[in-house]
Amino acid sequence: MSSTKQLKRRIKSVSNISQITKAMEMVSASKMRQAQLQALASRTYSRKLDDILSQLAEVIDTSYHQLLQAKPAQKEAILILSTDRGLTGSLNTNLFKTVSSFQQSKPLAVYTLGRLAREFTVKSGLDLKAHFGAVPDKLSYEEAVPIAALLIKEFTAATYSRVWIAYMDFVSTLSQTPRIAQLLPIQKTLETQPDRPMGLHKEYLFEPDPQTLLNWILPYSVELTIYQSLLEARASEHSARMVAMKNASENASELVDNLQLIYNRGRQANITGELLDIITASSTLS
């Protein structure tokens, strides 16, 4: 009897968990859709700016601006973007494994955004320079501005020779890839176009002058890269959490069915045993 009661309590407990994960799945699905649309919409603009800088890279000397030049510092820095909460499957684990492999080849100063990134940095014994707090629920471009300003300040002061950014790149609802990209110095490479005539070089007229233009567009490019990375990371987070909660709900439902089957078999065995006791007692009295 105690075994039957324990099964009933466990079935009820698993059913309650299933209801919670189902609700979290629905919430994540709603947030996922919005985050995906925002990331995909901004991605087009971000890539277009990359194309512009790639074309300018052919005609602009790196001496025009210090954000285009590597510094003679011995140390490099990395900005890690993670989630604040778990329940995202292996999303953060894959990101941290990639960062761990990357940092083994060079000394890194670490800047973090997201609680789990900070915890990973502290537990790994890495050099945590600054933590930018929690990831806001509603991302805006203004979130990237102070982060970019600090990294640009440290880079131009020759504190670091290079600055990297690590985040989860959104591929699809079922696929998110850890990515580490160089943030500073800004390097844009013009892809070879098969229909482009050999020896053809474009000429650009800068108004008012290249220095003034680069003073605006290069810091803006850093800000936009960080903002786009935040959008990609947010879309990856909600996608991974939705899939994880969906799997959890399905596993809970399957477990409830198995427990219910065990419970029914145990209950049937108890009833059969009681009937046998009654029949045996009746036979003995007769």
Image (cartoon, helix red, strand yellow):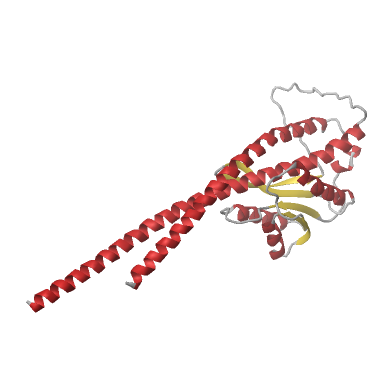
For this view, does 252 lie left or right of residue 164? Answer: left
For this view, does 273 lie left or right of residue 286? Answer: right
Q: Position of residue 97 (x, y in %)?
A: 64, 56
Taking the spot 67% from the left edge, 56% from the top edge, the residue there is 101
Name the outermost residue toward the bottom.
285
Numbered-mark total: 0
The answer to whether residue 71 is visible is no
Q: Position of residue 216 (x, y in %)?
A: 87, 37
Between 27 and 207, the residue placed more toward the observer is: 27
- Quarter containing the N terminus: bottom left
Residue 221 in which image quadrant: top right
For this view, does 111 lie left or right of residue 11? Answer: right
Name the outermost residue toward the left.
286
- Quarter containing the C terminus: bottom left
Taking the spot 69% from the left edge, 33% from the top edge, the residue there is 44
The answer to whether residue 73 is visible is yes
Q: Position of residue 271 (x, y in %)?
A: 23, 67
Q: Position of residue 64 (x, y in %)?
A: 91, 37
Between 116 and 157, the residue placed more toward the observer is: 116
Taking the spot 47% from the left edge, 55% from the top edge, the residue there is 18
Q: Is residue 190 above or below residue 172?
A: above
Residue 183 in which image quadrant: top right
Q: Is residue 115 above or below residue 238?
A: below
Between 283 and 211, the residue placed more toward the observer is: 283
